[in-house]
Image: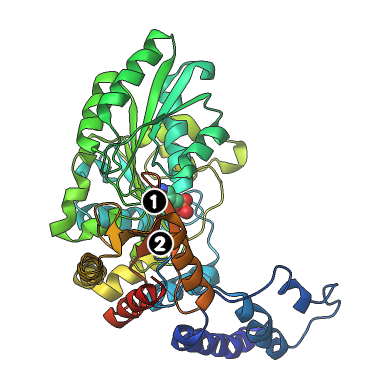
Amino acid sequence: MTPDAFRRHGHAMVDWVASYMERVEGLPVYPQVAPGAIRALLPHEPPVEGEPWEVIAADLDRVVLPGVVGWQSPDWFAFFPANVSGPSILGELASAGLGQQGMLWATSPACTELEAHVLDWLVGMLGLPEAFRSDGAGGGVLHDSASSAALTALVAARSRAAVSDGELVAYVSTQTHSSVEKDARVAGIPHLRLIDVDATFAMRVDLLEVQVAADRAAGLVPFFVAASVGTTSSLAVDPVRALGELCARERLWLHVDAAMAGVAAICPELRGLNDGVELADSYSTNPHKWLLTNFDCTLFYVRDRQALVDALSIVPEYLRNAASAAGSVIDYRDWQVPLGRRFRALKLWFVIRHYGVAGLQAFIRHGVALAAELVTWVAADARFVLVAPPRLGLVCVRHLDGDEATLRIVEAVNASGRAALTQTRLAGHATIRISIGQTHTERRHVAALWAQILSLA
Ligand SMILES: *Cc1c(COP(=O)(O)O)cnc(C)c1O
């Protein structure tokens, strides 16, 4: 494709994406497609000769749209807000066009330095500890996911523990995201303890302390604790400060997973979320959930970047270069599992500059205010109760008639195509998670959802 043809087709593709943004509200949030329906629209064999671009582009409407889920619909209240925004999409486009591989500073100084700089900005923007800034011993990096961030933290912690793998014990709570359990499996950590939670679904430090002591008495080596700031089921916040004090006493690596909730700390009045984070060895949060930035974009910070390099750096001949040898640059390949890395910082840089800190704060406050109003509507209806303390943009409710009545509502809403919800289980009860924070959700969308839920009650 010549640059001139790319220009023409690219303009048309931007038009198509813009019109999707305009159309998405009217499309079914969950399309009714049978398994195999999309594949049935595709030819059995790939084309031998190239096809005209117009034919290819038209298949976005014919083949793809019927199987697209309304993650970008303002009526999206399922899972988590998977924010997309204009400046972020344009950042993805620029990144794709530049095609950088930022594994070393030398393979893309712009990719490395923009990333380090934007991540330092975010330390201040989110009120995170200064120790996470890259001008000291720490630093931040962009990962594809919170799952990868926690895996990297686990591997660095194991390296620091410097004992044989067979004895290692990691700790999470019963509410910790399943990704940390998967990470422990991938890393070959033999023992993972699930610590019970209190009435607010936060990890019980007293039980953790007892378990660590029992494991030491059994000759095992406790080495890693993952705390959640915002669990997936209810956005519960573990007592990070108390956990950090315990981890300091016991010399355990503390990783804080704030994937969904952490970005809310951009609002000074919500900075309580960061309480105790200065005691953590590592921390992650996802602008690709709730800060207007396309997937994938996870912020991963460490207080001691040498721990990552010690665990992950291997230098074959073909990666040797003067800048790395001089030790004067960051080589992000040592801060992650893959070697190759794309220019993720561009979209984040565009988002921060387009909205400004004040614009991003206003966006978070808008979602929090909508959720607070929904809580008042829940309180006003005798058929529903809150199952967990509402936090930020997440409201967890159940029908008083029980699990069947509760799950029936989730199924009916999702089947209607008008909105999307997710169910979970909290304290033994089937629960409706109403997650507010999609880029274009307004009060009228939340009101329509609640009216629909009441009509099904
Ligand atoms: C969403 C979420 C994850 C997983 O995030 P990925 O970036 O998809 O790996 C992990 N932990 C928490 C608390 C989450 O909310």
Rendering colour mode: rainbow
Residue 406 numbered tag: none
Mark 1 vs ligand 1: CB below 8 Å: yes
Q: Earlier in the sequence, mark 2 or mark 1?
A: 2
> Where, quadrant-wise, is the C terminus in this rendering?
bottom left
Q: CA distance from mark 2 to mark 1?
A: 9 Å
- Rendering coords of residue 308 (x, y %): 42, 35
The percent position of residue 234, horizontal first and vertical second, equals: 33, 52
Q: Is residue 85 above or below residue 397?
A: below
> Callout 1, which amino acid?
Thr
Q: Mark 2 highlights which residue?
A: 80
| Residue nearest the viewer, comparing 286 with 346 | 286
Please name the amino acid that badge 2 sits on.
Phe
Q: Are marks 2 and 1 in contact (CB under 8 Å)?
A: yes
Residue 427, quarter of picture: top left
Q: Which residue is mark 1?
A: 232
State left or right for residue 5 relative to residue 171: right
Asked whether residue 314 appears in the rendered view, the answer is: no
Question: 10 Å neighbourhood of mark 2: few (<14), some, or many (≥20)?
Answer: many
Horizontal arrangement in the rendering, residue 106 relative to residue 293 (left or right): right
